[in-house]
Amino acid sequence: MNVKHQFPLLQKYGDTLAYMDNAATTQKPQVVIDAMVNYYENTNANIHRSPHRLGADATAAYEGARETVRSFIHAKKVEEIVFTKGATEAVNLVVQSYVAQHIRAGDNVVISIMEHHANFVPWQILCEERNASLRIIPINEAGELDVSTLDDLLDERTKILAISHISNTLGTINPIKKIIKTAHKKNIPVLIDGAQSIAHRVVNVQDLDCDFFVFSGHKIFAPTGIGVLYAKENYLKNMRPYQYGGDMILSVTVNKTTFNRIPYRFEAGTPPIAEAIGLAKALDFVHSLGRENIKAYTSELLHYATEKLTQIEGLRIIGQAQDKTSILSFTLADIHPHDIATLLDQQGIAIRAGHHCTQPLMEHYGIAGTARASFTIYNTKAEIDKLAAALKEVIKMFA
């Protein structure tokens, strides 16, 4: 896709940089940067309670961003959209405001072995605190979930199933619609971690029928420090606030505090106003490109990169699911992933190295970590050629 010129950082470095760390964070287009600068230069004010014109304009922009998110993920109501710092905070909000109020000793939570630590550790800690059990959906060697185990893992004491839409390490696209239907047959709510899928797939939360969906802005060309929790209205209305303070209240007396209506009761304090405006502009940017076009282009890059990298002797791709997105994790002979990433950086190629916040998954494969290249709309086949050539040079150096 011919969009690289719209990203000022990529324009600055030109052909000297091949940025392939998009599963960690994406670069920001000029329209997003301009929208945030415009807010600070022309509108900067606090929202909701300010009686002046600037406050009204800032409130309109912030609430307009909420409507943009609602439309982008096809939520039924704007009240179902809660702004958070990111997907991590959104998961923790559900842990503390919903599940923690219902889980007891002997109950269980179901997740998968491929979860990011953000969707693993909070559930693990909660289960430890409540003497509940954490049940794990296994995977096969290709990195695909063994959904046949769900009948045994899910029961009347399962309080929630929390699962990633797409693995940040393997690129595996999980059959979440099927998983959600299976859980709902047993009246079990489902949380979907959409941090990786939001930029690569059309997300329709009503069609999926998920109960919770979380994502971070910075993985879809938006700023850091902004994310979203979608939750069905009936859940939000019965959840306790996660944090307490300004704007999440209706009234406070010496003896009693009354909470604000949803979604505001979950947005304590001054929110990330400029970041929400930036998120809305990023979603508009993605919409203008067409998500099906993005899917087709990144799928083409994945296919091309897989062909190129599998020709390199000693390279092993970790995660070869039938259905996956443009993420390639790999090991290279016995060379440490950090050494690979360091040497590639010297050639102007930015990739990730390590366990990618999925240590249980690494343990499953019997490795300490991988190198990971992840592609998006501004990557090119020429950059993939550069990556393949650089990896061959790495092998020569260590030989």
Image (cartoon, rainbow, N blue to C red):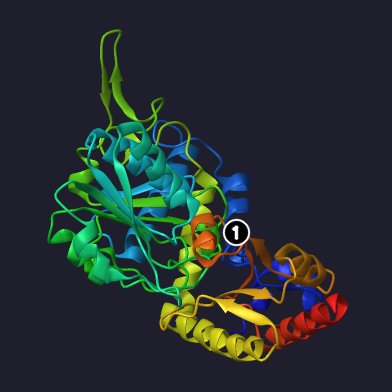
Looking at the picture, tell me which residue is in the foreground, 181 or 300: 181
Q: Where in the figure is residue 117, as x and y percent of width and height?
A: 49, 51
Instruction: Note whether 8 is above or below 42 in the view shown.
Output: below
Instruction: Note whether 131 is above or below 376 in the view shown.
Output: above
Residue 98 showing in the rendered view: no
Q: Which residue is mark 1?
A: 355
Q: Where in the figure is residue 349, as x and y percent of width and height?
A: 75, 73
Label 1 environment density (alpha carbons within 10 Å; few <14, some 14–19, many ≥20): many
Give residue 339's quadrant in the image. Answer: bottom right
Asked which secondary structure carries label 1, the reply is loop
Give residue 166's quadrant in the image. Answer: bottom left
Q: How many marks?
A: 1
Name the residue located 25 percent from the left edge and 14 percent from the top edge. Answer: 256
Which residue, as the protein is rendered here, is positioned at the far front? 366
Instruction: Note whether 121 is above or below 209 in the view shown.
Output: above
Name the residue located 34 percent from the left edge and 69 percent from the top edge. Answer: 203
Looking at the picture, tell me which residue is in the foreground, 252 or 56: 252
Quarter placement of the C terminus: bottom right
* Three-letter amino acid code at the position of disc 1: His
Name the residue located 41 percent from the left edge and 38 percent from the top edge. Answer: 125
Looking at the picture, tell me which residue is in the foreground, 91 or 66: 91
Q: Where in the figure is residue 392, as x and y percent of width and height?
A: 78, 84
Q: Where in the figure is residue 104, as x and y percent of width and height?
A: 23, 34
Residue 299 showing in the rendered view: yes
Q: Is residue 331 left or right of residue 136?
A: right
Instruction: Note whether 314 is above or below 353 in the view shown.
Output: below
Name the residue located 79 percent from the left edge and 65 percent from the top edge. Answer: 342
Give residue 71's quadrant in the image. Answer: bottom left
Quarter placement of the N terminus: bottom right
